Image: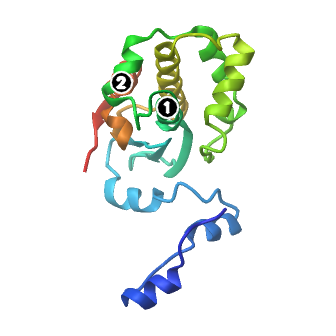
Amino acid sequence: TLQIGDGDHIAVNTGIITLSDFRQKHVAAGGEGAPLAAYGDYLLFSHATENRFLLNIGGISNFTFIPSYQTKLKAYATDLGPGNTMMNQYMKTNFNQEMDRDAYMAKKGQINDALLNQLLTEEFLTLPFPKTTGPELFNLAYLEKAQERSKTTHIPHENVMATLNRFAALAMVNGIRKQSEGLSDVAVYISGGGLHNPLLFDYIKSSLPTSKVESFAT
């Protein structure tokens, strides 16, 4: 793992006690190095009866699972798969826009099942939790290979965006379903930039009908 910045220089130049290099230490101890928020999330947001998922939709999607006090399960954090990264990269490359604001492009398109099924074949999506990934895996090169294999290289841009949107949503929904199997009183609190993508949010909510799904903007 490679991190930018140096805790010693920050401490000397600001006079503030600085703790750093968490990722390297976590990897050295046999962990994944990310996500790092599980302990703080547990202290702040654990609940007597709710089994909680704090779902963060950034470039990569991840959740912190916080079991209720009534279970013997342990809290942990894990990556799930793509969040906004592939959609943002596609919009930047093809439209010179930073994002698909309000899912405008994806809403215009239709999901291509052949492409979606090919995107979903990535082994990472089936690995046990916890796990980590990044844009080094889920990127436009990954999309291009999936399009070649599914013979969908010439479908309209809006159909690609609709498919990428559903791909990201399924990576999250499938992960939450996997961890919440057999649990009752499940709540999913969504934060991150993807919270503002209505197509993502609505699909996640409709796909988890027995769970409470709410925004968690701070």
| Along the viewing direction, whichever of 66 and 153 lies nearer the viewer | 153
Q: How many residues crowd around disc 2 within 10 Å: few (fewer than 14), some, or many (20 or more)?
A: some
Q: Which residue is mark 2?
A: 103
Q: Are marks 1 and 2 in contact (CB under 8 Å)?
A: no
Q: Residue at x 50, y 49 (%)?
A: 72
Q: How many residues crowd around disc 1 within 10 Å: few (fewer than 14), some, or many (20 or more)?
A: many
When the figure is inspected, residue 104 is found, relative to residue 84, above or below; the finding is above
Residue 71 location (% of width, % of height): 45, 45
Which residue type carries mark 1? Met
| Along the viewing direction, whichever of 174 and 93 lies nearer the viewer | 93
| Along the viewing direction, whichever of 126 and 149 lies nearer the viewer | 149
Q: Is residue 104 in sight in this rendering?
A: yes
Front of the two marks 1 and 2: 2
Residue 33 occupies quadrant: bottom right
| Along the viewing direction, whichever of 21 and 54 lies nearer the viewer | 21
Q: Is residue 209 in sight in this rendering?
A: no
Q: Which residue is mark 1?
A: 172
Which residue type carries mark 2? Ala
